[in-house]
Image (tube, rainbow, N blue to C red):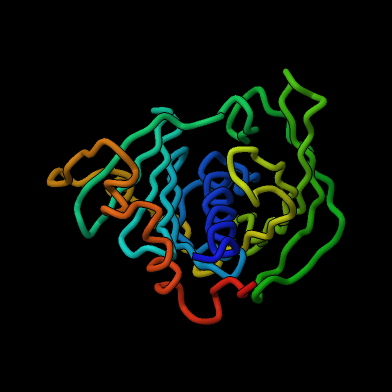
Amino acid sequence: MASVSIRYLVSVFFMASILLTGFSVLAAPPDNFTATMVSSGMEMPMSRMGTKSRVENPGMKGLVTISLADAKKTIMMNTISKTYYEQPIQDREKTPNVYDPDVVFDKKKVGTDTIDGHPCIKYDSIFYRKSKPEEKHKATLWEAQDLKDFNIQTEITVPANPKYQGSGGKMVMKFKDIKLGAATASMFEVPRDYKKVNSVQEVMGAGGMGNIGEMMKNIPKGQRPPKP
């Protein structure tokens, strides 16, 4: 598999992890919705209810990641093999979360815009931890006025994570097919007949990350990364 494909998938998964820890929903209301998140040409069905989030993997059918912030864990499950794996939420102390009382969040109105027919107020924002004021993060937000100030689009500068090659840089996250109040508790629960396994590779299948080639084939044409 070409390295560009691996970097592409890693950047998308890293972006999804930012979503799950609260980065992309910088404006607290509303906190119950289902939507499709679009970034880097890939579409990810997702939902949120309070501090719980769920994202479906766009490249591997049936792969779902659930984040339970209150329980401080993430769950990766496969709806086809009916398996799941739990792990602690990583690096929470390094990732500012809008729901954390230690985080200071400032935004300034810079104009108005229309995104997919939704009238929006555009903001520049800066957010950081009170305990680490020198580590500031920047983002531009578009809040849809007809969707109770839903943050319909975010342009954010993400710091590089040394664990993931190709991570970091500027990312644009956009939401469509938004349904406020549509998330239900069962979306964030593991069905009783699912089997708990010992690794992410077991959830993904015998090939683990070796299945990237098949994952890329499953991505619709027009959403695949460019060939090197």
Instruction: Say left or right for 63 vs 142.
Output: left
In-front residue for pair 205/86 = 205
Q: Quadrant of the C terminus?
A: bottom right
Query: Looking at this rendering, what residue extends furthest in the bottom direction?
Result: 221
Residue at the image position 78 percent from the left and 68 percent from the top: 113
**Vertical order, 44 against 205 (above or below):** below
Instruction: Say left or right for 172 vs 2.
Output: right
Residue at the image position 60 percent from the left and 47 percent from the top: 25
- The image quarter containing residue 23 is top right
In-front residue for pair 41/47 = 41
Query: Which percent across, then down, holds residue 52?
Result: 43, 41
Query: Looking at this rendering, what residue extends furthest in the left direction?
Result: 193
Query: Which percent across, then down, holds residue 72?
Result: 43, 28
Residue at the image position 67 percent from the left and 61 percent from the top: 145
**Vertical order, 21 against 33 (above or below):** above
Query: Which percent across, then down, holds residue 124?
Result: 82, 50
**Vertical order, 184 against 8 (above or below):** above
In-front residue for pair 169/103 = 169
Query: Which percent across, then down, holds residue 112?
Result: 81, 64
Query: Looking at this rendering, what residue extends furthest in the top direction?
Result: 131
- The image quarter containing residue 141 is bottom right
Tag count in the figure?
0
